Image (cartoon, rainbow, N blue to C red):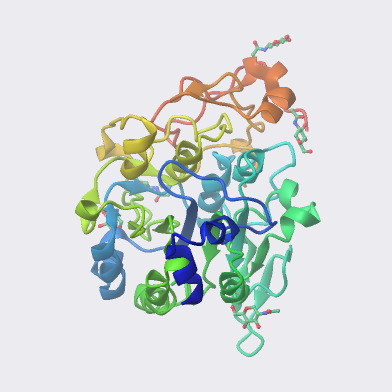
Amino acid sequence: MLTKLLLLSPFFPLALGDYSGYSNHGSQIVKGNTFNRFITIWFENTDFDKAAGDPNFAFFAKKGITLTNYFAVTHPSEPNYIASVTGDYFGIDNDEDNIIPANVSSVADLLEDKGISWGEYEDYMPSTGFTGFDFKDTKTHQNRYVKKHNPLITHASVAKAAQRRNNIKNFTLFEEDLKNNRIPQWVFITPDMQNDGHDTSVTYAGAWLRKFLEPLLKNPNFMKDTLILITFDENETYTAQNRVFSILLGDDVIPKHLVGTKDEGYYNHYSELATVQANWNLRTLGRYDVGANVFGIVRAKSGDKLRTLDISKVYNNESYPGIFNSDPKRWAPLPVPDTSAKFAGRTVLESIKRYWGRQQNKSVYKGAPLSIPTFQQPPVYPKCARRSN
Ligand SMILES: *[C@@H]1O[C@H](CO)[C@@H](O)[C@H](O)[C@H]1NC(C)=O
Ligand SMILES: *[C@@H]1O[C@H](CO)[C@@H](O)[C@H](O)[C@H]1NC(C)=O
Ligand SMILES: *[C@@H]1O[C@H](CO)[C@@H](O)[C@H](O)[C@H]1NC(C)=O
Ligand SMILES: *[C@@H]1O[C@H](CO)[C@@H](O)[C@H](O)[C@H]1NC(C)=O
Ligand SMILES: CC(=O)N[C@H]1CO[C@H](CO)[C@@H](O)[C@@H]1O
């Protein structure tokens, strides 16, 4: 209450300057054109209609914007999580301990480039920066924490650097960070295998979300300039279109007239990257983040355009070939980013240009297409790219 009074008082301009509720390393907050904090919470394996029909998910949908044409990028879980932070899934068609090499950049690099703090809260993770494959419930011996649902720890560039790895904490530390105004500006939250619906049901997941999030929606310190994206990693029915239920929330950032409405634009997990990039005018990764549609509320400020696609045939239900594909016949090299990509005024991160620039003629990403490759229409690798590792 005291904080609130100070913040609202015109006689305490310093109080505003002291407000550091977005930092995990004491840095100043970096303002975005629509939000100053992005929080995404991922649930598991649920078809669109089933999630939309759950009373608790429906409760949140009424308070925000439902994204009705938001697609996962493949099956199973892991490649979807990785795609959302890296702009590709490199042919992953499994949930193995795939380590994304250090020469592949992620959203962490883009955020750090602008001094924006980031972090993850992983439910049931046994210790900060834990790099193990899973962690079981001590009583039931069931998996509760799993690496495959932790998008950034799978990256060598994060797992091997203590300073970065330590931004990934047990979910139990969320409350403490909130109290101390230390929630970062970009946050990924993974409920455990029960709370995310994986080993339970959408009803269980909805009840968990209601209990966690409803009180926070009334907490001005948490909600200040915050955009929340609730989504699911993938649809449950593999033969159906991989459309997932997604909601945007944020009383400070969603205009009143849009509360309870739908945004019918075509989005996918790469839109998370594109939206964050458009909000903070970040550089890009030169992969499928370039060209992905930006969510409507950010587009309105950033000047990005909504592009349309015939989505009647978008399935995204099986992985294209790549370096981590479990079928040796479906191996393909680690793709070279398109370092000259320029889209909506955004260009590729300098360090990516420096590292990959000379291999441009091997890049598979060209022209920022809205449609992403699929099992049926895989990426086309230049002929000379031979297996070298
Ligand atoms: C990227 O890193 C991987 C793993 O260390 C290595 O095999 C590959 O050759 C590297 N690619 C380039 C282009 O340096
Ligand atoms: C991690 O979080 C879980 C609940 O999410 C909790 O049961 C566990 O005690 C925590 N572990 C540590 C080491 O904090
Ligand atoms: C993907 O969907 C198409 C169309 O329904 C179907 O033919 C194909 O078998 C599906 N793939 C998998 C892996 O289920
Ligand atoms: C790319 O350029 C290098 C020389 O700079 C050449 O050796 C290689 O064959 C070229 N690759 C393709 C796909 O054209
Ligand atoms: C678009 C969509 O929601 N995709 C499918 C997800 O799975 C269900 C099956 O329950 C299908 O009905 C949806 O079409």
In the image, residue 55 sits, relative to residue 335, either above or below, namely below
At a point 64% along the width and 46% down the height, the residue shown is 108
| Residue with the most extreme bottom position | 139
Q: Does 256 sit left or right of 203 as displayed?
A: left
Is residue 5 shown left or right of residue 15? left
Q: Where is residue 200 in the image (x, y as percent from the top left)?
A: 43, 77
Q: Nearer the viewer, residue 168 or 90?
A: 168
| Ligand 2 position by quadrant | bottom right
Above or below residue 230? Residue 328 is above
**Where, by quadrant of the figure, is residue 230 drawn?**
bottom left
Question: Is the C terminus in the top left, top right, bottom left or bottom right quadrant?
Answer: top right
Q: Nearer the viewer, residue 377 or 224?
A: 224
Residue positioned 66% across, 52% down in the render: 27
**Residue 82: where, in percent of width, then height?**
57, 49
Q: Where is residue 181 in the image (x, y as percent from the top left)?
A: 58, 67
Left or right of 345 on screen, residue 360: right
Nearer to me, 146 or 187:
187
Q: As rendered, which of 64 and 335 lies closer to the eye?
A: 64
Using residue 319 as the reference point, say whether residue 134 is left or right of it: right
Residue pictured at 55% horizontal, 32% vertical: 287
Give residue 353's position: percent from left, percent from top.
67, 24
- Residue 62 quadrant: bottom left
User: Would residue 43 be seen by someone viewing this image from the given angle?
Assistant: no
Figure disc tally: 0
Residue 213 appears in the figure: yes
